[in-house]
Amino acid sequence: MTFARKSTGNGFMLDIPKTRRTVLTGLAALAVGATIAPVSAFAQSPDFARFLADLWPEARAAGVSRATFDMAFAGVAPNPKIIAQTRKQAEFSRPIWEYLDGATGRGRVSRGAAMARQWAATVSESERRFGVPRQTLLGAWGMESDFGASTGKTYAIEALASLAFARHRGDLFRKELVIALKILEGEHISRGNMLGSWAGAMGQTQFLPSSFEKYAVDGDGDGARDIWASVPDALASTANFLHMNGWNPALPWGFEVVLPPDIDFRNFRLDFASWQRLGVRRADGVSLPRAGEAQLLILAGASAPVFLVTDNFEAIRAYNTSDSYALGVGLLGDMVYGSPGIRTPWPRTAPRLSGEERREVQQRLERLGVYKGKHDGNHGWQTRAAIRAYQLKHGLTGDGYADPMLLAHLRSAR
């Protein structure tokens, strides 16, 4: 078998097959023996066999050959452990400070600084080419794969097929599965190296297949888009993703701020000059930008760390809609390049709502006519806006944060 051997820059190598024959014979043999067996021989249930039978016409219409389809699914069956992971996403289930403790820990920051030095020229080229600052590139790289060291060990087809078969998030993962088959068909990666997370996110960028299709680019000039083994490709692809999702080079992602004691929380999104006039200051003492707009991000109450974030924060959230994740990207990248991190302490010992109580907040806000979203306990922008509207109406501190006192107030509301 003929392979191109490529380094990730982190001390390990991946073997990338160079020919179509290798993909359809050598790697299928790796999975199931010397020949490619029919998919149905490996399906562990009639329902999954029917699922694959229904999927085949969609894959064929997308340009996937029968040989690639059979090779991709040889030995694959739904994995219940993958479904279980859908209920354990840390960015939604853990307190923000615990999440950030892991995301921006000393060891990760140190590794990031070393990688920033090692790949300085590559980072600079991606920054120049796409207008995304090096801090954000390193932050995203570190959050997604610990700078290429933790890209995941799950076969992407198995992960996507399990989620699609369970209809997790409707048809989303079925569509991603078809695109993953197209990636195999196009010889971008071999079956044996098509590894990623339990959710089918692949490589150092942790791209879903649709993101690979839209945003992956060749960063090292070898004609391939290799987000698995090529650091230049991974960094350039991340930069292209953020660029294509609206990154504005003239603005930062955001920063921690100190609010004046008399802040009026009816002000939520203003230009920087207005925030300056209201007495809002950066926690690090640096002047606010002269141009642009930003909105308050308050995740644990007004006495906890507070941030002003620009539309670039939303570009990061296009990667992962969690506010905790996007904040982690921004803070980690800044810390890799020397920032000391958050200055205001988190309220680690303050009473917090349980998941069920957080859902109750959403239910009660809906009954009062100020909230129309899901009752999932995840207090994102929509929930926080509803909380803030309720707080301002009732003369409470309008920081958009639900604590036990807020829930007690809601329970007494009529």
Image (spheres, helix red, strand yellow):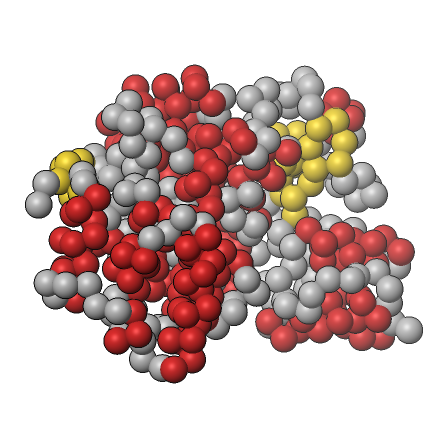
Numbered-mark total: 0
Q: Position of residue 36 (x, y in %)?
A: 19, 63
Quadrant of residue 71 in the image?
bottom left
Residue at the extreme bottom: 46
Q: Is residue 413 visible?
A: yes
Q: Position of residue 179 (x, y in %)?
A: 43, 50
Left of 27 or right of it: where is 170?
right
Left of 193 or right of it: where is 413?
right
Q: Residue at x 32, y 42 (%)?
A: 186
Front residue (pair 94, 2):
2
Q: Is residue 90 visible?
A: no
Q: Residue at x 41, y 55 (%)?
A: 60
Q: Could you tell me which quadrant the C terminus lies in?
A: bottom right
Front residue (pair 108, 10):
10
Quadrant of residue 50 in the image?
bottom left
Q: Residue at x 72, y 58 (%)?
A: 383
| Residue 88 vertical placement versus 23 (above, below) | below
Q: Could you tell me which quadrant the N terminus lies in?
A: top left
Front residue (pair 207, 209):
209
Front residue (pair 406, 82):
82
Q: Position of residue 290 (x, y in %)?
A: 68, 17
Left of 132 or right of it: where is 373?
right
Q: Residue at x 80, y 39 (%)?
A: 267
Q: Position of residue 246 (x, y in %)?
A: 59, 31
| Residue 107 vertical placement versus 350 (above, below) | above
Quadrant of residue 292 in the image?
top right
